[in-house]
Image: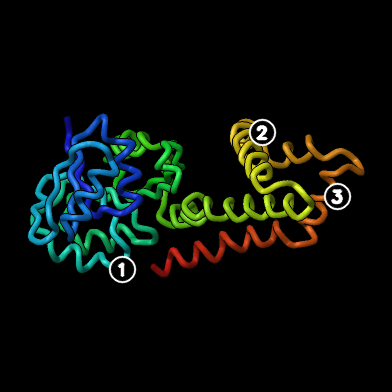
Amino acid sequence: MQTITFIGNGNMGLSIARGLKEKYIIEVVGRDMKKLDAFEDALGKKVEKALLDDFDISEKTLILCVKPNNVEEVSSKLRGTARVIFSVLAGTTVEKLKSSFKTNAVVRCMPNLAASVGKSMTTLTGDTNYKKEAELLLGAIGTTLWLGSEKEIDIATALAGSGPAYLALIAEALSDGAVKQGLKREDAMITMRGLFEGFGVLIQEIHPALLKDNVMSPGGTTAAGYSALENGNVRASCIDAIEVAYKKAKEL
């Protein structure tokens, strides 16, 4: 089996490793052996572990999952030239990665939190020679989409990468609304989760506008609630959230 080397042992790296552990040999590199042991325990499978200092990346396939502001520090501790780097660092350009690390190629990848359950929406861009490999590798944790530019992946980061937090806010708020009107908290949470589960299936096949129209009958409960959302500028706030998150991605 091919070995995939993780540089970094945080939550995103662990989520991706869970999707890959049955098809690849997992190697993880970090600063603290105790944290590497904890990574192995959480993964539930033996991995190859190494400390970061003077680690040789020659001809290795790397998944880079450190913090964006640690790129220079991490790269200075490595030696050799990697075969390819698959980077999950938000906003960190291919140019910066190539100037910081010795590597034959770079592919930027933006998974999201659902990687931990094999349902990530992962966008990709970079060296097109590694497109198929990137789609196969990241396809182990969900759906992939290859984009034509780094601008597009920064926008997609604001949508799919940050999106679970936006949806979590909406889920919590809707549940709170039901509790306010008298539904028990436990029942509100069960109802909300069932809502999101069914909606996740429907949205794969039906345009959002058509979904809304199919639910909203004239003068009905949905129309009343939808009007309240529009009055609260929920649509505009969602659009603004993508804009500010995209701008932040470019600043990283």
Name the residue that disc number 3 marks: 224
Residue 44: percent from left, percent from top: 26, 37
Choose the circle earlier in sequence order: 2 or 1. Answer: 1
Nearer the observer, 218 or 169: 169
What's the distance in space between the residues labelled 2 and 1, CA to CA?
Answer: 40 Å
Q: Residue at x 63, y 59 (%)?
A: 239
Quarter where residue 136 is shown: top left
Name the residue that disc number 1 marks: 69
Residue 74: percent from left, percent from top: 19, 63
Nearer the observer, 205 or 116: 116
What is the three-letter code of the residue carrying label 3?
Ala
Q: Residue at x 74, y 47 (%)?
A: 183
Q: Residue at x 21, y 63 (%)?
A: 99
Name the residue that disc number 2 marks: 206
Element under disc 3: helix
Badge 3: few (under 14), some or many (20 or more) residues near its Cα, within 10 Å?
Answer: few
What is the three-letter code of the residue carrying label 1?
Asn
Q: Is residue 4 left or right of residue 149?
A: left
Element under disc 2: loop
Assign the C terminus to one quadrant of the image. bottom left
What's the distance in space between the residues labelled 3 and 2, CA to CA?
Answer: 22 Å
Q: Residue at x 44, y 41 (%)?
A: 120
Eye-nearest disc, 3 or 2: 3
Eye-nearest disc, 2 or 1: 1
Residue 151: percent from left, percent from top: 44, 57
